[in-house]
Image: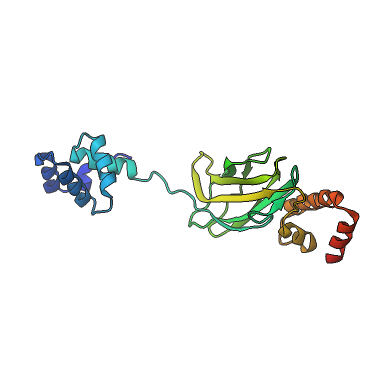
Amino acid sequence: MDVDVDNEFDGELLNQFRTLGTTDRDVLIAEFQAVLGNTLNPESCAFFLDMNDWNLQNAVCSYYDLEQPVSILPSMRVLEDITLGNGEAVAPNTTFVKAWRIKNSGSDHWPPGCQLQYYSGDSMCAIERRVLPALSPGESTEVSVEMKSPATPGFYNSIWRVFTPTGTMFGDPIQWSIAVSEGGLLGITQQLARIDGGGLNSEVQMAIQQQQHQEMATLSPSKVEEDTEMS
């Protein structure tokens, strides 16, 4: 957004800009900081000055042009992992559901069309994005993604982010990990969810129940009996 310099600085300060003839870069950096009320560190001041051939007036104008926010981004906070705690063990080639509860932690409504998207690390899923509801301020929701653990045992890490409909990232990064190992079982949170629902929505609950049936089919009869007694 263009800034009318005459509305930002009085005539005396503009005159100082025009008559300042020093080539001492340390002095220019100090002047730049003084104009901005010492809100910018020397390295950032030097960046804007160098971008404008060390012209103080032009550098200040560039700062306001580039740093003035065009719009306020939505806010998002991760409240909890609902299924499969961070770092839990999963057997190779196992389909599982990863779910989180997230919240609109800002004072503005989310625009329609915000999405949770795979960002970096190990994807482990065929569909790498989920459309989110347009949350009101303070409102929370559950979001789930069906994934499949890699065939090779090891430690896998994945990062997901929330984006606006225009592709701007906002909110907390959603980072989590699993340990893929032979004999690894699904997270205890999903086993507890089988008992009482755990507050999960029907989509997550159905996927977890299907997953539990697959897991039970791979266990030995003695292990199945043991799990049944524990339930």
Instruction: Report the side of 12 relative to 45 (left or right).
Output: left
Image coordinates for residue 134, horizontal then vertical, percent: 58, 50
Q: Is residue 103 left or right of residue 99?
A: left
Q: Residue at x 72, y 62 (%)?
A: 198
Residue 163 picture location, percent across and down: 53, 44
Which residue is rendered at x = 62% and y = 50% of the image? 177
> In this figure, which colouring scheme has been used for the structure?
rainbow
> Which image quarter holds the N terminus?
top left
Task: Please say whether residue 106 is visible from this viewpoint.
Answer: yes
Near-viewer residue (118 or 85): 85
Query: Residue 120: percent from the left, percent from the top?
Result: 56, 41
- Image point (60%, 46%), residue name: 157
Q: Is residue 119 visible?
A: no
Q: Quadrant of the C terminus?
A: bottom right
Q: Nearer the viewer, residue 82 or 19?
A: 82
* Res. 117 image quadrant: top right
Q: Is residue 219 left or right of residue 156?
A: right
Q: Which is nearer the eye, 110 or 41?
A: 41
